[in-house]
Image (cartoon, rainbow, N blue to C red):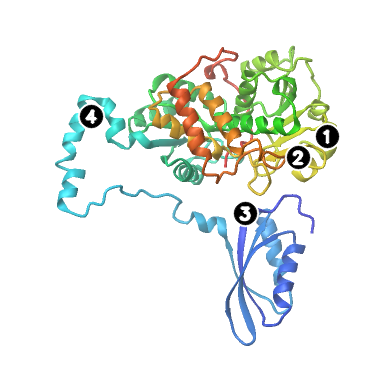
């Protein structure tokens, strides 16, 4: 059976099966699953009697249709009885993924009197007299709002606020797990820019930071810019800045692997939307040799008609040779390809035509711009956004530590200095003695990452150094096409 998509834990199923109690039954089961293109991850004996064995077989599949095919293949085996099929992803989401838990016990009347009335009145009066005390005496010191209107949920499109909630819950869980930050989903039943800005401004007093998530371009740029202007707490659009930080960190180490300097390489970025634009801006700040930006309009170049203001700026500040051809031609002889766009845009042959020791970051999820198995035949370093492939470039490496650092520093805004400091911290966690083609970023479970990023961001917040302006502000990016994100 030919499976073009890679099996993933995101489509993991557990199948309860009764098989004959003979020596070959379990082997036939696992063989049939493998032949169906799935990956067995666990097999547990649940019960047995003299004639049958009841087992739970867990396997990763490529998608829902593939899961059905695997079940059918098992069902076709002689003597096999499929009792139940469970989708492990849906099971994990039953009832939601986060909860509120109290930090105080409230075991006695005295404790209740201090936590709530009458004692709490004294704390209210203290904050009324000195509003800055809210950071010290309330959840504001450690709480972030994860705000979405559901207009650009992952790579799935405009699904609305209810369908966005599982993603925002997951984001909140990641904030807590990796940064010790209390985050809460705020999904809005409006996609009107003015209303979103007004609502977030109204709820901001309860939070120490705002994380914008899965809001479609171009509105996301205006929303971020207006909130930054209006609020005295950091506003961070993770689809932009989190992705850019992680890409810069990964590229820093990938270039160390191949022995190239950023100032000498030519980079092709597929996807000039929220993530792609932020990546290119950060690379330009760091002195990249050249960039070709590619999107639905083709390679952005000087003299091109029909460009919005953001793409016009990119056309004028990238693509030194004014290339105007297709994507395959753009990557020919390029040193680096970064994809934040759509699946299956390139082939292994296209990667073979890149420069010697090429670097490929194919970050579209769940299916990359080029099959990573094909890319690894020709490129020196390959990274994706997938957790089941080496070199996963995942925003969770950045945003928990970034917010941890900003909250600790009582920062009032997110800055480019913080982004650069965070990227360097992530890259340095790997250690030059550990870097190799399959390890250019640390694991998302590396306990050193978030504290290192937090420390770097905290230092940047407390000792900012000016960075010369080289791009339009967020308000000057009005029309940028949305593309697939590397965000989980």
Label 3, label 2: how far apart the Cα atoms are: 20 Å
Crowding at label 1, few (<14), some or many (≥20) Cα neighbours within 10 Å?
some
Question: Above or below — where is 301 with respect to 111?
Answer: above
Q: Are marks 3 and 2 in contact (CB under 8 Å)?
A: no
- Counting labels gives 4
The disc, 4 or 1, on the residue closer to the chain's N-terminal end is 4
Q: Earlier in the sequence, mark 4 or mark 3?
A: 3
Dot 2 or dot 1: first in sequence order is 1
Q: Quadrant of residue 488?
A: top right
Q: Which mark is residue 9?
A: 3
- Residue 55 x %, y %: 61, 73
Distance between mark 4 and mark 2 Cα atoms: 55 Å
Q: Which residue is mark 4?
A: 127
Rendered view: 296 above or below 63: above
Quadrant in which residue 253 is drawn = top right
Classify 10 Å Cα crowding around label 4: few (below 14), some (14-19), many (20 and above).
Answer: some
Residue 396 appears in the rendering: yes
Q: Residue furthest bottom?
A: 50
For disc 2, the neighbor class at 10 Å (few under 14, some 14 to 19, many from 20) is: many
Q: Which residue is mark 2?
A: 370
146 vs 460: above or below: below
The residue sitting at 57% across, 19% down in the picture is 477
The disc at residue 350 is 1
C-alpha span from label 1 to label 3:
29 Å
Point 33% across, 30% down: residue: 205
Q: Earlier in the sequence, mark 1 or mark 3?
A: 3
Gap in Å between the C-alphas at discs 4 and 3?
A: 47 Å
Disc 1 on helix, strand or loop? helix
Mark 4 and mark 3 residues within 8 Å of each other at the beta carbon: no
């Amino acid at each position: 059976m030919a499976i073009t998509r890679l099996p993933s834990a995101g489509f993991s199923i557990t199948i309860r099966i009764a098989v004959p109690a003979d020596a070959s039954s379990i082997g036939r089961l696992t063989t049939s699953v493998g032949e169906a293109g799935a990956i067995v991850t666990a097999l547990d004996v649940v019960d047995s009697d003299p004639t049958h064995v009841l087992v739970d077989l867990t396997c990763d599949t490529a998608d829902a249709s593939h899961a059905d095919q695997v079940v059918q293949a098992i069902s076709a085996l002689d003597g096999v009885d499929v009792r139940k099929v469970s989708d492990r992803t849906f099971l994990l989401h039953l009832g939601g993924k986060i909860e509120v838990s109290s930090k105080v016990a409230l075991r006695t009347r005295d404790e209740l009197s201090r936590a709530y009335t009458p004692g709490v009145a004294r704390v209210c009066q203290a904050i009324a007299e000195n509003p800055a005390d809210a950071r010290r005496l309330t959840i504001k010191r450690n709480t972030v709002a994860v705000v979405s209107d559901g207009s650009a949920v992952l790579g799935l499109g405009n699904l609305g606020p209810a369908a966005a909630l599982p993603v925002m819950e997951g984001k909140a869980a990641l904030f807590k797990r990796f940064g010790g930050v209390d985050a809460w989903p705020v999904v809005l039943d409006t996609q009107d820019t003015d209303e979103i800005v007004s609502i977030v401004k109204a709820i901001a007093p309860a939070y120490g930071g705002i994380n914008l998530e899965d809001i479609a371009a171009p509105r996301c740029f205006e929303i971020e810019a207006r909130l930054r202007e209006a609020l005295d707490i950091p506003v961070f659009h993770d689809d932009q800045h989190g992705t850019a930080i992680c890409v810069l960190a990964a590229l820093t180490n990938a270039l160390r692997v191949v022995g190239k300097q950023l100032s000498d390489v030519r980079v092709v970025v597929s996807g000039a939307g929220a993530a792609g634009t932020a990546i290119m801006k950060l690379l330009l700040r760091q002195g990249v040799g050249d960039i070709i930006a590619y999107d639905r309009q083709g390679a952005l170049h000087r003299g091109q008609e029909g460009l919005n203001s953001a793409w016009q700026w990119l056309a004028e500040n990238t693509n030194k040779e004014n290339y105007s051809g297709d994507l395959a031609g753009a990557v020919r002889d390029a040193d680096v390809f970064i994809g934040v766009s759509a699946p299956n845009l390139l082939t292994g042959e296209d990667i073979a035509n890149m420069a010697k020791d090429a670097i490929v970051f194919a970050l579209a999820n769940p299916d990359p711009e080029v099959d990573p198995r094909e890319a690894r035949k020709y490129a020196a370093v390959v990274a994706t956004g997938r957790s089941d492939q080496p070199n996963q470039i995942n925003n969770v490496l950045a945003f928990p530590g970034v917010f941890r650092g900003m909250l600790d520093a009582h920062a009032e805004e997110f800055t480019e200095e913080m982004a650069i400091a965070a990227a360097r911290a992530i890259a340095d966690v790997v250690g030059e003695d550990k870097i190799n083609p399959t390890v250019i970023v640390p694991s998302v479970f590396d306990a050193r990452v978030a504290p290192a990023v937090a420390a770097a961001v905290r230092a940047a917040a407390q000792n900012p150094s000016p960075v010369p302006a080289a791009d339009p502000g967020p308000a000057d990016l009005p029309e940028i096409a949305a593309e697939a994100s590397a965000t989980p």
